[in-house]
Image (cartoon, rainbow, N blue to C red):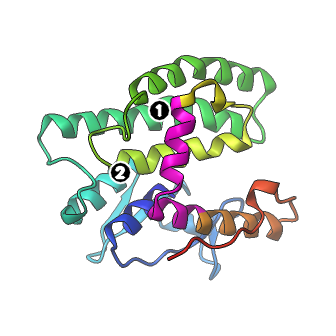
Amino acid sequence: MATRIALLEAGAPFEYVEVDAPTKRTRDGADYREIHPLGLVPALRTDDGQLITENAAVLQYIADALPAAGLAPPAGSRERVRLQQWLSFIGTELHKGVYAPLLGSEVPDAVRSWALEKGLSRFDYLAHHLDGREFLLDRFSVADAYLVTVLTWSVATPIDLKKWPSLVAYLQRLQARPSVAAALHAERKLYGEELARHGRPVPAFLRPREAPAS
């Protein structure tokens, strides 16, 4: 979703290939692990055939390839270091450190409780930074594309963002942004279809909604 937001924000042409999470197969039946052995998304194939993986790398590549969109500070600048700092924080402290254990179907309850408790200080830190700020940096960046993606997952976890009003305000503000709204609508639809294919119940928050205005 973060990649989709970045590409929509930049107004860039792109083609998505859906990967079925349980089977690691694409819609045409190809084994995605032949493209990326770990079977993880996102993986970006450039026009010249280069394969780029990992959110932080993919997002910065998009920002650098489409500089007119202003999705990242210039390479080598102090602000670019701040962007990398936030991408690392989101990827390790939130995505893998908190949300992955809470969303994993085979994770023991003790690990879930540990992750939830561990997350409190991370959310405190993030909320303090966003208090009085519109974005993570001075303007919308690929770090915001990643953060709004991760925070959106809270609805499927025990995390109650209401404890942090600045995070609630940030999430509402970002979800109303056209690129984010369009990406969220598309991703919810695809995930709901995936669950239905495997006979799993579709949660209320994934049920079809009206498409955002173009």
Say which of 203 and 130 sits in front: 130
Label 1 vs label 2, nearer the camera: 2
**Callout 1 crowding tier (Cα within 10 Å): few <14, some 14–19, many ≥20:** few
Residue at (26, 40) in percent of width and height: 138
Residue at (57, 29) in percent of width and height: 165
Membership of 151 in magenta stretch: no
Are the residues flagged by discs 1 and 2 in contact, CB closer than 8 Å?
A: no
Dividing the picture into quadrants, the one containing residue 66 is bottom left
Say which of 164 and 47 sits in front: 164
Q: Position of residue 136 (x, y in %)?
A: 36, 37
Read off the magenta span.
166-184
Q: Secondary structure at mark 2?
A: helix
Q: Is residue 198 left or right of residue 50?
A: right
| Residue holding disc 1 | 92
Q: Is residue 70 left or right of residue 74?
A: right
Is residue 170 shown above or below 63? above
Q: CA distance from mark 1 to mark 2?
A: 16 Å
Residue at (77, 42) in percent of width and height: 105
Give residue 142's mark. Answer: 2
Is residue 113 shown above or below 166? above
Membership of 171 in magenta stretch: yes
Residue furthest out toward the front: 132
Mark 2 belongs to which amino acid? Val
Mark 1 belongs to which amino acid? Thr
Q: Magenta stretch mostly in which secondary structure?
A: helix
Q: Position of residue 22 (x, y in %)?
A: 71, 59
Q: Earlier in the sequence, mark 1 or mark 2?
A: 1
